[in-house]
Image: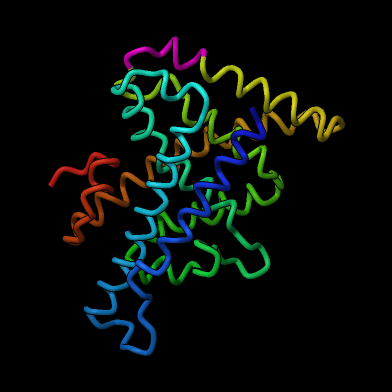
């Protein structure tokens, strides 16, 4: 199971790399405060988000058990978990030495870059704080893959029709993560509960993200259709 998840993640990640040339270039040399530069930075970040969402959907379809669920539950789980998985993947790409986050191999961003792209400090700071906390835990690829699978199969998401079935599908991944952590670090009995607590932190970050999306709407910044659909943004 673990090998299958890690392999699926790597494959989805590689497919995302092929989309890198399609992303609107980050403006260089132009007046950073000009309207065109601001729009270009916003487009750049939203296009990265689209690639990330597509990668998450591709991965979810390869997680054993996901396609056994009804379509309504698949959609409900993806809508609720996508931003949280994006934040997990962001933390995974955090470099504690440079305090930057790298997407698609060589797109690297500082806090200031996130702000220049139109995100609020109230959302940016928690992202970096969460990323630092995850860095301290030092998760490997297997632990990230299992944590993401556990996150996907969260039975308490809104509009889930068969919560007991979702919970049953989640349980093997919880047990696998517990066994894996005990084998990998037998002396650290708190590692497993610490990882699960990060899923609680993600719920809080998800709420902050909803506020960020609302703020973007107030600024008249329209999200692409895919992001509007996945985040339930209604114009």
Choose between 137 and 218: the one closer to the eye: 137
Majority secondary structure of magenta residues = helix
Choose between 129 and 17: the one closer to the eye: 17
Query: Is residue 167 rendered magenta in the image?
Result: yes
Q: Position of residue 154 (x, y in %)?
A: 46, 24
Identify whether 231 is placed above or below 165.
Answer: below
Name the residue at 12% across, 47% down.
Answer: 235
Identify whether 173 is placed above or below 167.
Answer: below
Name the residue at 54% across, 28% down.
Answer: 150
Tell which residue pokes out farthest to the top in this image: 164
Tell which residue pokes out farthest to the left in this image: 235
Choose between 195 and 165: the one closer to the eye: 165
User: How many tags in the picture?
Assistant: 0
Q: Quadrant of residue 74?
A: top left
Name the residue at 43% across, 40% down.
Answer: 58
Residues rendered magenta in the picture: 161-168
Q: In this view, does 120 lie to the left or right of 190?
A: left
């Amino acid at each position: 199971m673990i090998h299958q998840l890690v392999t699926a993640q790597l494959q989805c990640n590689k497919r995302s790399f092929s989309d890198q040339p399609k992303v609107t270039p980050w403006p260089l040399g132009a007046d950073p405060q000009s309207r065109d530069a601001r729009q270009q930075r916003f487009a750049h970040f939203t296009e990265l988000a689209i690639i990330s969402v597509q990668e998450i959907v591709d991965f979810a379809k390869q997680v054993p058990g996901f396609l056994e669920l009804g379509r309504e539950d698949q959609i409900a789980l993806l809508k609720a978990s996508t931003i949280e998985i994006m934040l997990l993947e962001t933390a995974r790409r955090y470099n504690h030495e440079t305090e930057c986050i790298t997407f698609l191999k060589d797109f690297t961003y500082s806090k200031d870059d996130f702000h220049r792209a139109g995100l609020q400090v109230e959302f940016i700071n928690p992202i970096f704080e969460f990323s630092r906390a995850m860095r301290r835990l030092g998760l490997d690829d297997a632990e990230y893959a299992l944590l993401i699978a556990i996150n996907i199969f969260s039975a308490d998401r809104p509009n889930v029709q068969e919560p007991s079935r979702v919970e049953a599908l989640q349980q093997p991944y919880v047990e696998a993560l517990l066994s894996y952590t005990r084998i990998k670090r037998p002396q650290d009995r708190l590692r497993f509960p610490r990882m699960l607590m990060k899923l609680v932190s993600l719920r809080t970050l998800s709420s902050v993200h909803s506020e960020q999306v609302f703020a973007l709407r107030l600024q008249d910044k329209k999200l692409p259709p895919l992001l509007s659909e996945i985040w339930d943004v209604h114009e």
